[in-house]
Image: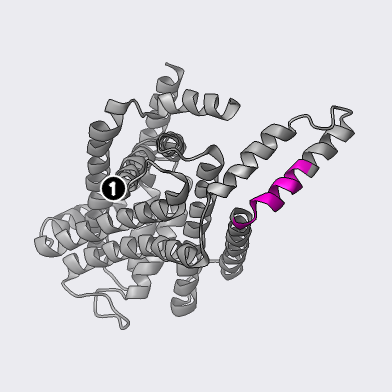
Amino acid sequence: MRGSKRTLIMWGVSLFAVVCIVVAFREQLGFIEEGLDVASRADTGKSLVVVLLLVFALLSMGEVMYLLLESGAPRMRRRDTAMLTFAANSWSTTLPGGPAFSAIFTFQVQRSWGASVVLVSWFIVLSGVLSTMWLAVLGLVGVLLLGAHLSLLSLIGTIVIMVGVATIVYWVSRNPETVTRCAVWVVRQINRLSHGPRDRWVPAVRRQFLQLRSVVLSPGRFAIAAMWSLANWVFDILGLWAAVWAITGSLPWLEREPNSTTIVGVVLAFVTAKIAGSAQVTPGGIGPVEAAMVGTLVATGMTASAATASVIIYRLVSLILITAIGWVIYLASFVPRGLTPATSRSAASDKLDS
C-alpha cells in the first residue's frame, strides 16, 4: 500500500508541475497548436518508418542482453530478451522513478532464466556503461560538427570514464580467480581490523565472485555487443530523423534546407533531450524532453511548428505506442508467471541473502 501511495504522490507532483508550466507559459504556447495541426497531416508511410526504426532500437537492446547473458542463462532465448526489453521499457517510461521498477523487474526475470546474481549485476553495469559511453560519443560528434553549447570537457571526461569502467568490467569477467583472491584479501583485512575471525564472510564472497566463471565473453563477442548498444541509439536517432522527414518532406542531411535541419542537428536534439530527461522527474521525461528537442531543432533551422510536429510524431511512437506494446507483452507473458516488480523485490532479497 505504501508503494501505491508513493506512486500516486509522484504522479500528482509530476502532473502538477506540467500544469504549472502550461499555465505560466500559455500565451507563448501557440506553436503547440500549430504543431498538432501540422502533425495531423504527416505522411503515413514515413510515420510507419518511425515505428519500425524505434522497434529496431529496442530489439537492439534485447540483442545486447542476449549476447552478454547467453553463457550464464541456460533458460534464455532471443525472443525472451526482446520481450523483456519492451516490458522493462514500459515500466521505465510510465512511472516517475520508473527505471528503478524496471531494474527490479529485469533482475527477477533474468534470475528466472538461470543467471546468477553476480552475472545479472555484471550485465547491468556493463550494458549501462556501454550505453552511456555511446551517448557521450554521439554528443561529442554534435559538439564538434555543429559547435553546440554542450560541455566538451564533460563529454570527453564521460567517454574516458566509461571506456575505463567498461575495460575494468570486461577484465573482471575474464579473470574471476584473480578478482576472487583480491576480494578475499580485502575481506580478511577487514576482519583483521575489526578483530573478527580471519575467514568470516570469506566462503560467501568466494562463492559469489567465482560465479563470474559463467561469463564467457570473447573480445569479438564483446565488440559485437558494443556495436548493438550503439545501434540502439542510432535507430532511436533515426526515428527522430524520420519524424522530421514525415513532417517536412525532406530528409535532413549534411546541408540544411530552408525551414529544416541537418542530420547533425537531429543527433544534437536527441542527445540534448536525453540529458534533459535523465532525471525523469515526470513519467517518460514528459515536458523536459519535448522542450529540449523542440528548442534544439529550432536552433538548428526548423520552424517552431515543424519542430513541434516532428517531436509530437516521435514521442507518440516512442512514448505511447512502444510503451503500449510493452505493457501488452508484460501482461501476456510475465504476469501469468508471477514476474512483477512487487514480487521481484522480495524474491531478489531472498536470493541475495542465500
Give how far across and how far down residue 351 sits, in percent: 53, 28
Is residue 135 positioned above or below 123 on the image?
below
For the stretch drawn in magenta, the main secondary structure is helix
Q: Which residues are magenta?
A: 174-184
Q: Is residue 151 left or right of residue 289?
A: right
- Locate residue 111: give its quadrant: top left
Is residue 228 positioned above or below 340 on the image?
below
Query: Three-letter amino acid code at disc 1?
Result: Arg
Magenta stretch: residue 9 in it? no
Magenta stretch: residue 181 in it? yes
Q: Is residue 197 left or right of residue 221?
A: right
> In what element is the residue under mark 1?
helix
Give how far across and how far down residue 113 sits, in percent: 40, 38
Between 60 and 234, the residue placed more toward the observer is 60
Is residue 69 positioned above or below 265 on the image?
above
Residue under label 1, please give it: 79
Give the colour scheme of this rendering.
one colour
Between 140 and 175, the residue placed more toward the observer is 175
Residue farthest toward the bottom in the current orientation of the protein? 255
Q: Look at 56% across and 42% down and name the residue there.
A: 118
For disc 1, the neighbor class at 10 Å (few under 14, some 14 to 19, many from 20) is few
Give how far across and how far down residue 339 sits, in percent: 36, 29
Give how far across and how far down residue 2 sits, in percent: 46, 18
Q: Look at 46% across and 50% down and name the residue there.
A: 71
Does the image show residue 9? no
Between 160 and 266, the residue placed more toward the observer is 160
Specify the quadrant that holds the C terminus.
Answer: top right
